[in-house]
Amino acid sequence: MSESRIIQSVARALNILELFERTSMELSVTEIANQLDLSKSTAFGLINTLARKGYLEQNPRDSRYSLGLKLLRLGGAVQRHSILVNRAKPYMEKLVQEFSETVHLTVERNGMVVYIEKIEGEKAIFMQSAIGAENPMYCTAVGKCLLAFMPESKSERLLKKMEPLQRRGPNTITDIAELQKELQTIRERGISIDDEEHVPGLMCIAAPLRNHDGEVVAAISISGAKAGISSKMVGHISERITTVAQQISATM
Amino acid sequence: MSESRIIQSVARALNILELFERTSMELSVTEIANQLDLSKSTAFGLINTLARKGYLEQNPRDSRYSLGLKLLRLGGAVQRHSILVNRAKPYMEKLVQEFSETVHLTVERNGMVVYIEKIEGEKAIFMQSAIGAENPMYCTAVGKCLLAFMPESKSERLLKKMEPLQRRGPNTITDIAELQKELQTIRERGISIDDEEHVPGLMCIAAPLRNHDGEVVAAISISGAKAGISSKMVGHISERITTVAQQISATM
DNA sequence: AAACACAGTCCGACAATAGCGAACAAAGAA
DNA sequence: TTCTTTGTTCGCTATTGTCGGACTGTGTTT
Protein backbone atom coordinates (compact mmCIF):
# COMPACT_ATOMS: atom_id res chain seq x y z
CA MET A 1 0.00 0.00 0.00
CA SER A 2 2.98 2.28 0.47
CA GLU A 3 3.79 4.83 -2.16
CA SER A 4 7.40 3.88 -2.68
CA ARG A 5 8.67 4.33 -6.17
CA ILE A 6 8.87 1.35 -8.39
CA ILE A 7 11.42 1.08 -11.13
CA GLN A 8 9.57 1.24 -14.37
CA SER A 9 11.93 -0.56 -16.67
CA VAL A 10 12.08 -3.50 -14.30
CA ALA A 11 8.33 -3.59 -13.99
CA ARG A 12 7.98 -3.47 -17.73
CA ALA A 13 10.46 -6.29 -18.18
CA LEU A 14 8.51 -8.42 -15.74
CA ASN A 15 5.32 -7.56 -17.56
CA ILE A 16 6.86 -8.98 -20.69
CA LEU A 17 7.58 -12.27 -18.95
CA GLU A 18 4.05 -12.39 -17.62
CA LEU A 19 2.68 -11.68 -21.05
CA PHE A 20 4.38 -14.83 -22.28
CA GLU A 21 2.94 -16.77 -19.40
CA ARG A 22 -0.55 -15.74 -20.44
CA THR A 23 -0.32 -16.14 -24.17
CA SER A 24 1.66 -19.36 -24.12
CA MET A 25 3.27 -19.01 -27.49
CA GLU A 26 6.07 -17.31 -29.31
CA LEU A 27 5.68 -13.56 -29.55
CA SER A 28 7.32 -11.04 -31.84
CA VAL A 29 8.83 -7.75 -30.74
CA THR A 30 6.01 -5.85 -32.39
CA GLU A 31 3.30 -7.93 -30.76
CA ILE A 32 4.83 -7.39 -27.35
CA ALA A 33 5.19 -3.67 -27.97
CA ASN A 34 1.54 -3.42 -28.97
CA GLN A 35 0.24 -5.55 -26.11
CA LEU A 36 2.08 -3.53 -23.49
CA ASP A 37 1.84 -0.11 -25.12
CA LEU A 38 5.53 0.38 -25.60
CA SER A 39 7.41 1.71 -28.55
CA LYS A 40 9.02 -0.98 -30.61
CA SER A 41 12.50 0.17 -29.69
CA THR A 42 11.73 0.20 -25.98
CA ALA A 43 10.27 -3.26 -26.19
CA PHE A 44 13.30 -4.41 -28.10
CA GLY A 45 15.65 -3.07 -25.47
CA LEU A 46 13.85 -4.90 -22.71
CA ILE A 47 13.49 -8.10 -24.71
CA ASN A 48 17.11 -7.98 -25.69
CA THR A 49 18.17 -7.65 -22.08
CA LEU A 50 15.93 -10.50 -20.98
CA ALA A 51 17.13 -12.67 -23.84
CA ARG A 52 20.74 -12.00 -23.15
CA LYS A 53 20.29 -13.13 -19.57
CA GLY A 54 18.50 -16.30 -20.62
CA TYR A 55 15.01 -15.30 -19.53
CA LEU A 56 13.81 -15.22 -23.12
CA GLU A 57 15.01 -17.12 -26.13
CA GLN A 58 14.89 -16.22 -29.75
CA ASN A 59 13.84 -18.77 -32.30
CA PRO A 60 16.44 -18.41 -35.07
CA ARG A 61 13.93 -19.48 -37.68
CA ASP A 62 11.47 -16.65 -37.38
CA SER A 63 13.33 -14.51 -34.81
CA ARG A 64 10.35 -14.56 -32.48
CA TYR A 65 10.81 -14.95 -28.75
CA SER A 66 9.67 -17.39 -26.10
CA LEU A 67 10.35 -17.96 -22.40
CA GLY A 68 13.91 -19.00 -21.61
CA LEU A 69 15.25 -21.86 -19.60
CA LYS A 70 16.70 -19.63 -16.89
CA LEU A 71 13.19 -19.40 -15.54
CA LEU A 72 13.17 -23.14 -15.01
CA ARG A 73 16.15 -22.78 -12.74
CA LEU A 74 14.62 -20.00 -10.73
CA GLY A 75 11.35 -21.87 -10.42
CA GLY A 76 13.25 -24.89 -9.23
CA ALA A 77 15.19 -22.75 -6.79
CA VAL A 78 11.98 -21.54 -5.18
CA GLN A 79 10.94 -25.08 -4.48
CA ARG A 80 14.37 -26.20 -3.45
CA HIS A 81 14.72 -23.37 -0.95
CA SER A 82 11.30 -23.88 0.52
CA ILE A 83 11.63 -25.62 3.84
CA LEU A 84 7.93 -26.29 3.63
CA VAL A 85 8.21 -28.24 0.38
CA ASN A 86 11.21 -30.16 1.58
CA ARG A 87 9.62 -31.13 4.85
CA ALA A 88 6.28 -32.04 3.35
CA LYS A 89 7.39 -33.91 0.26
CA PRO A 90 8.20 -37.31 1.78
CA TYR A 91 4.88 -37.34 3.60
CA MET A 92 3.08 -36.36 0.43
CA GLU A 93 4.68 -39.25 -1.39
CA LYS A 94 3.50 -41.62 1.27
CA LEU A 95 -0.07 -40.41 0.79
CA VAL A 96 0.18 -40.81 -2.97
CA GLN A 97 1.31 -44.40 -2.58
CA GLU A 98 -1.45 -45.08 -0.13
CA PHE A 99 -4.37 -43.73 -2.16
CA SER A 100 -3.00 -43.45 -5.72
CA GLU A 101 -4.58 -40.01 -5.91
CA THR A 102 -2.96 -36.64 -6.55
CA VAL A 103 -1.65 -34.77 -3.51
CA HIS A 104 -1.19 -30.99 -3.44
CA LEU A 105 0.65 -28.60 -1.15
CA THR A 106 -0.68 -25.04 -1.16
CA VAL A 107 -0.34 -21.64 0.47
CA GLU A 108 -2.31 -18.42 0.28
CA ARG A 109 -1.07 -15.38 -1.63
CA ASN A 110 -3.16 -12.27 -2.25
CA GLY A 111 -6.40 -14.06 -1.58
CA MET A 112 -5.64 -16.93 -3.93
CA VAL A 113 -4.46 -20.49 -3.35
CA VAL A 114 -1.07 -21.14 -4.89
CA TYR A 115 0.01 -24.69 -5.60
CA ILE A 116 3.62 -25.05 -4.54
CA GLU A 117 4.02 -28.81 -4.88
CA LYS A 118 2.08 -31.53 -6.55
CA ILE A 119 2.59 -35.27 -6.76
CA GLU A 120 0.40 -37.14 -9.17
CA GLY A 121 -1.07 -40.51 -8.35
CA GLU A 122 -1.84 -43.33 -10.74
CA LYS A 123 -5.46 -42.35 -11.01
CA ALA A 124 -4.71 -38.75 -11.90
CA ILE A 125 -5.76 -37.93 -15.42
CA PHE A 126 -7.93 -34.96 -15.84
CA MET A 127 -6.55 -32.31 -13.54
CA GLN A 128 -4.49 -29.72 -15.30
CA SER A 129 -3.38 -28.06 -12.11
CA ALA A 130 0.22 -26.92 -12.33
CA ILE A 131 2.83 -25.94 -9.82
CA GLY A 132 2.64 -22.20 -9.36
CA ALA A 133 -0.94 -22.07 -10.56
CA GLU A 134 -3.52 -20.05 -8.65
CA ASN A 135 -7.11 -20.89 -7.83
CA PRO A 136 -9.88 -19.14 -5.90
CA MET A 137 -10.17 -19.88 -2.20
CA TYR A 138 -13.92 -20.06 -1.64
CA CYS A 139 -14.50 -23.14 -3.78
CA THR A 140 -11.44 -25.30 -3.15
CA ALA A 141 -10.77 -27.58 -0.21
CA VAL A 142 -7.36 -26.09 0.41
CA GLY A 143 -8.65 -22.54 -0.01
CA LYS A 144 -11.46 -22.99 2.48
CA CYS A 145 -9.03 -24.69 4.83
CA LEU A 146 -6.61 -21.77 4.73
CA LEU A 147 -9.47 -19.29 5.10
CA ALA A 148 -10.87 -21.16 8.09
CA PHE A 149 -7.66 -21.09 10.09
CA MET A 150 -6.29 -17.63 9.33
CA PRO A 151 -6.76 -14.67 11.69
CA GLU A 152 -10.33 -13.47 11.47
CA SER A 153 -9.38 -9.94 10.50
CA LYS A 154 -7.60 -11.26 7.47
CA SER A 155 -10.30 -13.68 6.40
CA GLU A 156 -12.92 -10.93 6.74
CA ARG A 157 -10.93 -8.74 4.41
CA LEU A 158 -10.37 -11.51 1.88
CA LEU A 159 -14.00 -12.59 1.93
CA LYS A 160 -15.11 -9.06 1.13
CA LYS A 161 -12.80 -8.93 -1.85
CA MET A 162 -13.96 -12.19 -3.37
CA GLU A 163 -17.63 -11.29 -3.65
CA PRO A 164 -19.57 -12.21 -5.67
CA LEU A 165 -18.84 -15.92 -5.39
CA GLN A 166 -19.11 -17.31 -8.87
CA ARG A 167 -20.55 -20.76 -9.41
CA ARG A 168 -17.86 -23.16 -10.62
CA GLY A 169 -19.41 -26.58 -10.00
CA PRO A 170 -22.77 -28.03 -8.94
CA ASN A 171 -22.15 -27.48 -5.21
CA THR A 172 -20.27 -24.19 -5.18
CA ILE A 173 -21.11 -22.10 -2.12
CA THR A 174 -22.19 -18.77 -3.55
CA ASP A 175 -23.45 -17.12 -0.37
CA ILE A 176 -20.97 -15.46 1.99
CA ALA A 177 -22.96 -16.26 5.13
CA GLU A 178 -23.15 -19.88 4.16
CA LEU A 179 -19.44 -19.89 3.44
CA GLN A 180 -18.77 -18.54 6.92
CA LYS A 181 -20.83 -21.34 8.42
CA GLU A 182 -18.81 -23.79 6.34
CA LEU A 183 -15.57 -22.28 7.66
CA GLN A 184 -16.83 -22.77 11.20
CA THR A 185 -17.55 -26.43 10.45
CA ILE A 186 -14.05 -26.79 9.02
CA ARG A 187 -12.55 -25.32 12.19
CA GLU A 188 -14.49 -27.84 14.27
CA ARG A 189 -13.71 -30.86 12.13
CA GLY A 190 -10.15 -29.87 11.27
CA ILE A 191 -10.85 -31.02 7.72
CA SER A 192 -12.01 -29.19 4.62
CA ILE A 193 -13.90 -30.91 1.82
CA ASP A 194 -14.57 -29.70 -1.70
CA ASP A 195 -17.40 -31.75 -3.10
CA GLU A 196 -17.71 -30.65 -6.73
CA GLU A 197 -17.55 -27.01 -5.72
CA HIS A 198 -14.66 -26.10 -7.97
CA VAL A 199 -14.72 -28.60 -10.83
CA PRO A 200 -17.63 -30.88 -11.67
CA GLY A 201 -16.83 -34.49 -10.84
CA LEU A 202 -13.87 -33.60 -8.67
CA MET A 203 -13.57 -34.06 -4.93
CA CYS A 204 -10.81 -32.83 -2.63
CA ILE A 205 -10.05 -33.28 1.05
CA ALA A 206 -7.65 -30.88 2.75
CA ALA A 207 -5.99 -30.44 6.14
CA PRO A 208 -4.00 -27.50 7.58
CA LEU A 209 -0.24 -27.38 8.21
CA ARG A 210 1.01 -25.31 11.13
CA ASN A 211 4.38 -23.75 11.86
CA HIS A 212 6.08 -24.04 15.21
CA ASP A 213 4.00 -21.16 16.51
CA GLY A 214 0.81 -23.01 15.71
CA GLU A 215 -0.16 -20.66 12.88
CA VAL A 216 -1.63 -22.31 9.80
CA VAL A 217 0.78 -21.59 6.96
CA ALA A 218 -0.23 -24.13 4.32
CA ALA A 219 -2.67 -26.88 3.45
CA ILE A 220 -2.30 -30.29 1.87
CA SER A 221 -5.02 -32.02 -0.07
CA ILE A 222 -5.92 -35.25 -1.77
CA SER A 223 -7.92 -34.91 -4.97
CA GLY A 224 -9.72 -37.46 -7.04
CA ALA A 225 -12.73 -38.26 -9.17
CA LYS A 226 -15.82 -38.20 -6.99
CA ALA A 227 -17.05 -41.36 -8.64
CA GLY A 228 -14.04 -43.25 -7.34
CA ILE A 229 -14.37 -42.22 -3.69
CA SER A 230 -16.97 -43.93 -1.54
CA SER A 231 -18.36 -42.12 1.49
CA LYS A 232 -16.58 -44.38 3.96
CA MET A 233 -13.41 -43.75 1.94
CA VAL A 234 -13.88 -40.06 2.70
CA GLY A 235 -13.71 -40.83 6.39
CA HIS A 236 -10.59 -42.89 5.97
CA ILE A 237 -8.84 -40.28 3.85
CA SER A 238 -9.81 -37.55 6.32
CA GLU A 239 -8.26 -39.45 9.19
CA ARG A 240 -5.07 -40.20 7.34
CA ILE A 241 -4.55 -36.70 5.97
CA THR A 242 -5.15 -35.23 9.42
CA THR A 243 -2.54 -37.51 10.92
CA VAL A 244 -0.03 -36.75 8.18
CA ALA A 245 -0.68 -33.02 8.45
CA GLN A 246 0.10 -33.20 12.15
CA GLN A 247 3.26 -35.16 11.47
CA ILE A 248 4.47 -32.55 9.00
CA SER A 249 3.55 -29.73 11.38
CA ALA A 250 5.59 -31.43 14.09
CA THR A 251 8.74 -31.10 11.97
CA MET A 252 8.37 -27.36 11.43
CA MET B 1 27.86 -11.14 -29.62
CA SER B 2 26.38 -7.86 -30.82
CA GLU B 3 27.02 -4.75 -28.83
CA SER B 4 23.43 -3.62 -28.44
CA ARG B 5 22.75 -1.78 -25.27
CA ILE B 6 21.28 -3.66 -22.38
CA ILE B 7 19.03 -1.99 -19.87
CA GLN B 8 20.96 -1.79 -16.67
CA SER B 9 18.21 -1.69 -14.12
CA VAL B 10 16.64 -4.79 -15.63
CA ALA B 11 19.95 -6.60 -15.67
CA ARG B 12 20.55 -5.64 -12.06
CA ALA B 13 17.11 -6.83 -11.02
CA LEU B 14 17.75 -10.17 -12.67
CA ASN B 15 21.11 -10.35 -10.94
CA ILE B 16 19.29 -10.03 -7.66
CA LEU B 17 17.08 -12.99 -8.49
CA GLU B 18 20.10 -15.02 -9.51
CA LEU B 19 21.86 -14.08 -6.32
CA PHE B 20 19.04 -15.69 -4.40
CA GLU B 21 19.31 -18.76 -6.56
CA ARG B 22 22.95 -19.14 -5.59
CA THR B 23 22.79 -18.36 -1.90
CA SER B 24 19.59 -20.26 -1.22
CA MET B 25 18.51 -18.35 1.82
CA GLU B 26 16.85 -15.17 2.91
CA LEU B 27 18.88 -12.06 2.17
CA SER B 28 18.65 -8.57 3.58
CA VAL B 29 18.68 -5.39 1.54
CA THR B 30 22.15 -4.56 2.80
CA GLU B 31 23.54 -7.97 1.98
CA ILE B 32 22.21 -7.77 -1.54
CA ALA B 33 23.58 -4.26 -1.99
CA ASN B 34 27.01 -5.37 -0.84
CA GLN B 35 27.06 -8.54 -2.92
CA LEU B 36 26.14 -6.72 -6.10
CA ASP B 37 27.97 -3.45 -5.43
CA LEU B 38 24.90 -1.27 -5.34
CA SER B 39 23.98 1.49 -3.01
CA LYS B 40 21.48 0.48 -0.40
CA SER B 41 18.80 2.71 -1.84
CA THR B 42 19.29 1.41 -5.36
CA ALA B 43 19.10 -2.14 -4.14
CA PHE B 44 16.00 -1.29 -2.20
CA GLY B 45 14.32 0.19 -5.25
CA LEU B 46 14.95 -2.92 -7.28
CA ILE B 47 13.98 -5.26 -4.47
CA ASN B 48 10.85 -3.31 -3.81
CA THR B 49 9.82 -3.54 -7.45
CA LEU B 50 10.51 -7.26 -7.57
CA ALA B 51 8.66 -7.81 -4.33
CA ARG B 52 5.67 -5.84 -5.41
CA LYS B 53 5.35 -7.98 -8.52
CA GLY B 54 5.63 -11.19 -6.53
CA TYR B 55 9.13 -12.17 -7.60
CA LEU B 56 10.47 -11.65 -4.11
CA GLU B 57 8.75 -11.95 -0.77
CA GLN B 58 9.48 -10.24 2.48
CA ASN B 59 9.46 -12.19 5.67
CA PRO B 60 7.46 -10.01 8.08
CA ARG B 61 9.41 -11.33 11.04
CA ASP B 62 12.86 -10.06 10.13
CA SER B 63 11.95 -8.11 6.97
CA ARG B 64 14.42 -10.09 4.94
CA TYR B 65 13.61 -11.22 1.44
CA SER B 66 13.41 -14.52 -0.39
CA LEU B 67 12.32 -15.72 -3.83
CA GLY B 68 8.63 -15.26 -4.54
CA LEU B 69 6.05 -17.69 -5.78
CA LYS B 70 5.56 -15.87 -9.07
CA LEU B 71 8.72 -17.57 -10.19
CA LEU B 72 7.08 -20.94 -9.70
CA ARG B 73 4.41 -19.93 -12.16
CA LEU B 74 6.87 -18.76 -14.75
CA GLY B 75 8.97 -21.88 -14.35
CA GLY B 76 5.85 -23.97 -14.80
CA ALA B 77 4.90 -21.94 -17.84
CA VAL B 78 8.21 -22.73 -19.50
CA GLN B 79 7.54 -26.42 -19.17
CA ARG B 80 3.92 -26.14 -20.10
CA HIS B 81 4.70 -24.25 -23.28
CA SER B 82 7.47 -26.56 -24.31
CA ILE B 83 6.22 -28.82 -27.07
CA LEU B 84 9.26 -30.94 -26.44
CA VAL B 85 8.35 -31.63 -22.82
CA ASN B 86 4.73 -32.30 -23.67
CA ARG B 87 5.56 -34.69 -26.45
CA ALA B 88 8.25 -36.54 -24.55
CA LYS B 89 6.60 -36.84 -21.15
CA PRO B 90 4.30 -39.81 -21.77
CA TYR B 91 7.16 -41.78 -23.28
CA MET B 92 9.40 -40.88 -20.37
CA GLU B 93 6.79 -42.16 -17.97
CA LYS B 94 6.66 -45.43 -19.83
CA LEU B 95 10.42 -45.82 -19.45
CA VAL B 96 10.24 -45.05 -15.74
CA GLN B 97 7.63 -47.75 -15.23
CA GLU B 98 9.67 -50.19 -17.23
CA PHE B 99 12.98 -49.76 -15.44
CA SER B 100 12.10 -47.98 -12.19
CA GLU B 101 15.04 -45.68 -12.80
CA THR B 102 15.10 -41.88 -13.19
CA VAL B 103 14.56 -40.52 -16.71
CA HIS B 104 15.81 -37.09 -17.81
CA LEU B 105 15.07 -34.86 -20.77
CA THR B 106 17.82 -32.38 -21.61
CA VAL B 107 18.91 -29.74 -24.10
CA GLU B 108 22.11 -27.80 -24.64
CA ARG B 109 22.42 -24.13 -23.69
CA ASN B 110 25.69 -22.20 -23.78
CA GLY B 111 27.78 -25.35 -23.72
CA MET B 112 26.00 -26.85 -20.75
CA VAL B 113 23.33 -29.54 -20.45
CA VAL B 114 20.10 -28.20 -19.03
CA TYR B 115 17.60 -30.58 -17.48
CA ILE B 116 14.15 -29.59 -18.65
CA GLU B 117 12.17 -32.56 -17.35
CA LYS B 118 12.81 -35.30 -14.90
CA ILE B 119 10.73 -38.24 -13.72
CA GLU B 120 12.02 -40.17 -10.78
CA GLY B 121 11.81 -43.90 -10.56
CA GLU B 122 11.40 -46.03 -7.47
CA LYS B 123 15.10 -46.70 -7.22
CA ALA B 124 16.05 -43.05 -7.37
CA ILE B 125 17.61 -41.89 -4.17
CA PHE B 126 20.88 -40.13 -4.40
CA MET B 127 20.64 -37.88 -7.40
CA GLN B 128 20.04 -34.29 -6.54
CA SER B 129 19.57 -33.20 -10.12
CA ALA B 130 16.84 -30.61 -10.42
CA ILE B 131 14.79 -29.30 -13.27
CA GLY B 132 16.55 -26.28 -14.71
CA ALA B 133 19.90 -27.41 -13.34
CA GLU B 134 22.99 -27.31 -15.54
CA ASN B 135 25.79 -29.84 -15.86
CA PRO B 136 28.93 -30.05 -17.99
CA MET B 137 28.65 -31.82 -21.32
CA TYR B 138 31.90 -33.76 -21.56
CA CYS B 139 31.21 -36.09 -18.65
CA THR B 140 27.48 -36.78 -18.90
CA ALA B 141 25.70 -39.24 -21.18
CA VAL B 142 23.25 -36.61 -22.40
CA GLY B 143 26.00 -34.02 -22.83
CA LYS B 144 28.18 -36.31 -24.92
CA CYS B 145 25.14 -37.34 -26.89
CA LEU B 146 24.25 -33.74 -27.73
CA LEU B 147 27.88 -32.96 -28.56
CA ALA B 148 28.14 -35.97 -30.85
CA PHE B 149 25.19 -35.05 -33.00
CA MET B 150 25.52 -31.27 -33.28
CA PRO B 151 27.10 -29.56 -36.29
CA GLU B 152 30.85 -30.03 -36.18
CA SER B 153 31.58 -26.31 -36.24
CA LYS B 154 29.57 -25.88 -33.08
CA SER B 155 31.00 -28.84 -31.23
CA GLU B 156 34.53 -27.73 -32.12
CA ARG B 157 33.85 -24.35 -30.59
CA LEU B 158 32.27 -25.80 -27.46
CA LEU B 159 35.06 -28.34 -26.97
CA LYS B 160 37.66 -25.57 -27.07
CA LYS B 161 35.80 -23.66 -24.41
CA MET B 162 35.51 -26.55 -21.98
CA GLU B 163 39.19 -27.32 -21.69
CA PRO B 164 40.66 -28.42 -19.40
CA LEU B 165 38.36 -31.36 -18.73
CA GLN B 166 38.21 -31.73 -15.00
CA ARG B 167 38.03 -35.18 -13.46
CA ARG B 168 34.62 -35.74 -11.86
CA GLY B 169 34.47 -39.51 -11.46
CA PRO B 170 36.78 -42.52 -11.84
CA ASN B 171 36.25 -42.78 -15.62
CA THR B 172 36.01 -39.14 -16.66
CA ILE B 173 37.51 -38.55 -20.10
CA THR B 174 40.03 -35.76 -19.53
CA ASP B 175 41.68 -35.73 -22.93
CA ILE B 176 40.05 -33.86 -25.79
CA ALA B 177 41.31 -36.23 -28.47
CA GLU B 178 39.94 -39.18 -26.57
CA LEU B 179 36.64 -37.38 -26.12
CA GLN B 180 36.45 -36.85 -29.86
CA LYS B 181 36.98 -40.56 -30.45
CA GLU B 182 34.21 -41.23 -27.94
CA LEU B 183 31.90 -38.87 -29.82
CA GLN B 184 32.62 -40.78 -33.02
CA THR B 185 31.70 -44.02 -31.27
CA ILE B 186 28.48 -42.44 -30.05
CA ARG B 187 27.61 -41.38 -33.57
CA GLU B 188 28.13 -44.93 -34.77
CA ARG B 189 26.20 -46.61 -31.98
CA GLY B 190 23.50 -43.99 -31.65
CA ILE B 191 23.81 -44.34 -27.87
CA SER B 192 25.84 -42.44 -25.30
CA ILE B 193 26.94 -43.99 -22.04
CA ASP B 194 28.27 -42.29 -18.93
CA ASP B 195 29.99 -44.93 -16.84
CA GLU B 196 30.95 -43.15 -13.63
CA GLU B 197 32.35 -40.23 -15.57
CA HIS B 198 30.29 -37.57 -13.83
CA VAL B 199 29.43 -38.97 -10.42
CA PRO B 200 31.08 -42.01 -8.81
CA GLY B 201 28.74 -44.97 -8.71
CA LEU B 202 26.34 -43.50 -11.24
CA MET B 203 25.66 -44.76 -14.73
CA CYS B 204 23.59 -43.10 -17.46
CA ILE B 205 22.50 -44.14 -20.93
CA ALA B 206 21.30 -41.49 -23.36
CA ALA B 207 19.82 -41.28 -26.85
CA PRO B 208 19.22 -38.28 -29.14
CA LEU B 209 15.86 -36.71 -30.04
CA ARG B 210 15.49 -35.16 -33.48
CA ASN B 211 13.10 -32.54 -34.82
CA HIS B 212 11.24 -32.96 -38.08
CA ASP B 213 14.31 -31.72 -39.95
CA GLY B 214 16.39 -34.50 -38.46
CA GLU B 215 18.46 -32.16 -36.31
CA VAL B 216 19.25 -33.38 -32.80
CA VAL B 217 17.56 -30.95 -30.43
CA ALA B 218 17.50 -32.87 -27.16
CA ALA B 219 18.54 -36.06 -25.42
CA ILE B 220 16.80 -38.41 -23.02
CA SER B 221 18.60 -40.55 -20.52
CA ILE B 222 18.08 -43.28 -17.97
CA SER B 223 20.21 -42.99 -14.84
CA GLY B 224 20.83 -45.44 -12.06
CA ALA B 225 23.32 -46.85 -9.61
CA LYS B 226 25.99 -48.72 -11.52
CA ALA B 227 25.80 -51.55 -9.00
CA GLY B 228 22.19 -52.17 -9.96
CA ILE B 229 22.75 -52.43 -13.72
CA SER B 230 24.22 -55.62 -15.15
CA SER B 231 26.05 -55.49 -18.46
CA LYS B 232 23.32 -57.29 -20.34
CA MET B 233 20.88 -54.84 -18.80
CA VAL B 234 22.88 -52.07 -20.47
CA GLY B 235 22.18 -53.64 -23.83
CA HIS B 236 18.51 -53.94 -23.08
CA ILE B 237 18.18 -50.38 -21.85
CA SER B 238 20.11 -49.11 -24.87
CA GLU B 239 17.73 -50.83 -27.24
CA ARG B 240 14.64 -49.57 -25.47
CA ILE B 241 15.79 -45.98 -25.11
CA THR B 242 16.77 -45.89 -28.78
CA THR B 243 13.34 -47.12 -29.79
CA VAL B 244 11.58 -44.65 -27.52
CA ALA B 245 13.76 -41.78 -28.73
CA GLN B 246 12.79 -42.59 -32.29
CA GLN B 247 9.13 -42.72 -31.33
CA ILE B 248 9.34 -39.29 -29.72
CA SER B 249 11.25 -37.90 -32.69
CA ALA B 250 8.53 -39.18 -34.99
CA THR B 251 5.97 -36.97 -33.24
CA MET B 252 7.96 -33.78 -33.69
C1' DA C 1 12.32 -9.78 -61.11
C1' DA C 2 11.12 -5.92 -59.05
C1' DA C 3 8.35 -3.73 -55.84
C1' DC C 4 6.34 -3.93 -51.64
C1' DA C 5 5.31 -4.69 -46.81
C1' DC C 6 6.67 -5.82 -42.65
C1' DA C 7 9.65 -7.99 -39.73
C1' DG C 8 13.90 -7.14 -36.21
C1' DT C 9 17.61 -4.06 -35.23
C1' DC C 10 20.25 0.16 -34.60
C1' DC C 11 21.10 5.21 -33.69
C1' DG C 12 21.00 9.94 -31.86
C1' DA C 13 18.87 13.38 -28.99
C1' DC C 14 16.10 14.65 -25.32
C1' DA C 15 13.89 14.37 -20.97
C1' DA C 16 12.28 11.41 -17.75
C1' DT C 17 13.93 8.86 -13.97
C1' DA C 18 17.07 5.64 -11.83
C1' DG C 19 20.71 6.19 -8.63
C1' DC C 20 23.09 8.23 -4.97
C1' DG C 21 23.85 10.25 -0.31
C1' DA C 22 21.84 11.65 3.57
C1' DA C 23 18.18 11.62 6.80
C1' DC C 24 14.57 8.88 9.08
C1' DA C 25 12.26 5.20 11.82
C1' DA C 26 12.22 1.02 14.09
C1' DA C 27 14.13 -2.85 16.21
C1' DG C 28 17.83 -5.21 18.82
C1' DA C 29 22.09 -5.46 21.38
C1' DA C 30 25.08 -3.88 24.74
C1' DT D 1 19.26 4.04 28.46
C1' DT D 2 22.45 4.47 24.35
C1' DC D 3 24.43 2.67 20.49
C1' DT D 4 24.21 0.09 16.31
C1' DT D 5 22.13 -1.56 12.43
C1' DT D 6 18.30 -2.49 9.93
C1' DG D 7 14.68 -1.18 6.23
C1' DT D 8 12.73 2.81 4.25
C1' DT D 9 12.09 7.60 2.37
C1' DC D 10 13.36 11.98 0.13
C1' DG D 11 15.26 15.30 -3.20
C1' DC D 12 18.79 16.51 -6.42
C1' DT D 13 21.49 15.46 -10.33
C1' DA D 14 23.36 13.22 -14.10
C1' DT D 15 22.67 9.06 -16.07
C1' DT D 16 20.26 6.32 -19.21
C1' DG D 17 16.07 4.57 -20.70
C1' DT D 18 12.81 6.11 -24.18
C1' DC D 19 11.16 7.53 -28.56
C1' DG D 20 11.00 8.46 -33.60
C1' DG D 21 13.08 7.48 -37.39
C1' DA D 22 16.47 5.14 -40.34
C1' DC D 23 18.41 0.72 -41.66
C1' DT D 24 18.48 -4.15 -43.20
C1' DG D 25 16.84 -8.42 -44.45
C1' DT D 26 13.22 -11.72 -45.52
C1' DG D 27 9.16 -13.23 -47.73
C1' DT D 28 5.17 -12.13 -50.53
C1' DT D 29 2.74 -10.07 -54.22
C1' DT D 30 2.41 -8.23 -58.48
Image (tube, coloured by chain):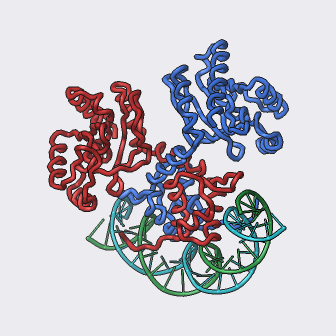
Chain colours: A blue, B red, C green, D cyan
Q: Residue at x 52, y 28 (%)?
A: A93
Question: Quadrant location of the N terminus of chain B?
Answer: bottom left
Residue B58 at x, y percent in the picture: 66, 54
Above or below for C26 versus B149: below
Above or below for A101 versus A24: above
Residue A208 at x, y percent in the picture: 69, 32
Question: Quadrant location of the C terminus of chain B?
Answer: top left
Above or below for B40 versus B77: below
Residue B147 at x, y percent in the picture: 25, 50
Residue B197 at x, y percent in the picture: 26, 44
Q: Residue at x 70, y 47 (%)?
A: A110
Residue B210: in sight, yes or no?
no
Q: How many marks?
A: 0
Residue B185: in sight, yes or no?
yes
Q: Residue at x 27, y 61 (%)?
A: B161
Residue A37 sits in which quadrant?
A: bottom right
Above or below for A128 versus B187: above
